[in-house]
């Protein structure tokens, strides 16, 4: 009987939620950057000691890469959700920027910008794997935007001579600007005005009015 109880104790479920642990680790990297985040910081945030962290996610580098991949995929899905709907192009693009600002400037917290731009861009200089994740992330966002611009051309929202791929990079550049300027202290009102001006620039005055 005693042996059965011991075996059951050893086989009990893990005491942590891996999804929540990744979110908590992400927030540490988001606030402190990769280089500024210590294992003690990550252990404290996740509620896991170092051996448990290593067993669940690998070392600090592997954990950081997982948070980047998770962030990119969630952001991509959010963009797809907006861009694949029936909103007119200008409204959809503005909605993407509004969603981004809600992440960059969380209510009740300090401005944090974009996890990818704010942390991976600096680490990418010395880290090939991070540079690959950064490039892949930016390109996947471009692809979502490009698909919507292509549809806009086909449906007559944009004139056919415009290049959807270049428009996508322009739209992404506005996202990058919002991410950097939010961290630099620009007000939400200023950032929203920048986003609206970017939409008018890309889509045209008539498009945003529809």
Image (cartoon, grey):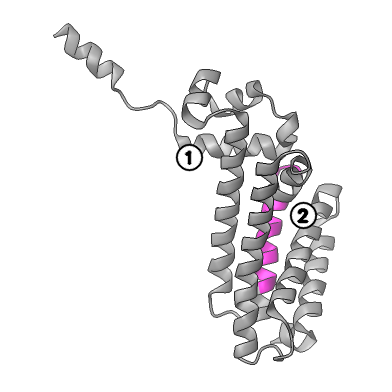
For the question of whether residue 22 can be seen, the reply is: yes
Quadrant holding the N terminus = top left
Of all residues shown, which one is farthest toward the front? 128
Query: Is residue 21 placed above or below 68 in the rendered structure?
Result: above
Judged left or right of residue 144, residue 197 is right
Query: Is residue 4 placed above or below 145 in the rendered structure?
Result: above
Judged left or right of residue 131, residue 80 is left
Res. 210 image quadrant: bottom right
Q: Over which residues does the magenta segment extend?
A: 93-110
Residue that numbered label 2 is attached to? 179
Residue shown at 55%/67% (left/top)?
80
- Which label's residue is closer to the chain start, 1 or 2? 1
Residue shown at 57%/48% (left/top)?
69
For the question of whether residue 105 can be seen, the reply is: no
Residue that numbered label 1 is attached to? 19
Q: Secondary structure at mark 1?
A: helix
Percent x, y of residue 108: 70, 44
Q: Is residue 98 magenta?
A: yes
Residue shown at 58%/60% (left/top)?
76
**How far is mark 1 from mark 2, CA to CA?**
25 Å
Counting other residues with Cα less than 10 Å from the Cα at mark 2, is it few (<14), some (14-19), or many (20 or more)?
A: many
Q: Is residue 170 magenta?
A: no
> Which one is in front, 210 or 171?
171
Chief SS of the magenta region: helix
């Amino acid at each position: 009987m005693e042996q059965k109880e011991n075996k059951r104790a050893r086989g009990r479920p893990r005491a942590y939620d891996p999804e929540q642990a990744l979110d908590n680790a992400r927030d540490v990297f988001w606030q402190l950057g990769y280089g500024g985040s210590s294992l003690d910081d990550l252990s404290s945030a996740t509620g896991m000691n170092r051996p448990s962290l290593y067993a669940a996610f690998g070392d600090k580098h592997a954990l950081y890469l997982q948070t980047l991949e998770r962030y990119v995929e969630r952001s991509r899905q959010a963009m797809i959700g907006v861009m694949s709907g029936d909103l007119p192009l200008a409204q959809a693009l503005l909605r993407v920027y509004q969603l981004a600002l809600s992440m960059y400037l969380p209510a009740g917290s300090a401005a944090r910008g974009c996890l990818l731009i704010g942390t991976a861009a600096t680490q990418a200089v010395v880290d090939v794997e991070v540079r690959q994740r950064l490039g892949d992330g930016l390109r996947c966002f471009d692809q979502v935007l490009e698909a919507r611009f292509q549809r806009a051309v086909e449906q007559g929202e944009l004139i056919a001579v415009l290049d959807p791929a270049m428009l996508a990079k322009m739209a992404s550049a506005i996202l990058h600007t919002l991410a950097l300027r939010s961290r630099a202290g620009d007000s939400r009102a200023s950032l929203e005005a920048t986003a609206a001006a970017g939409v008018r620039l890309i889509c045209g005055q008539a498009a945003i009015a529809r």
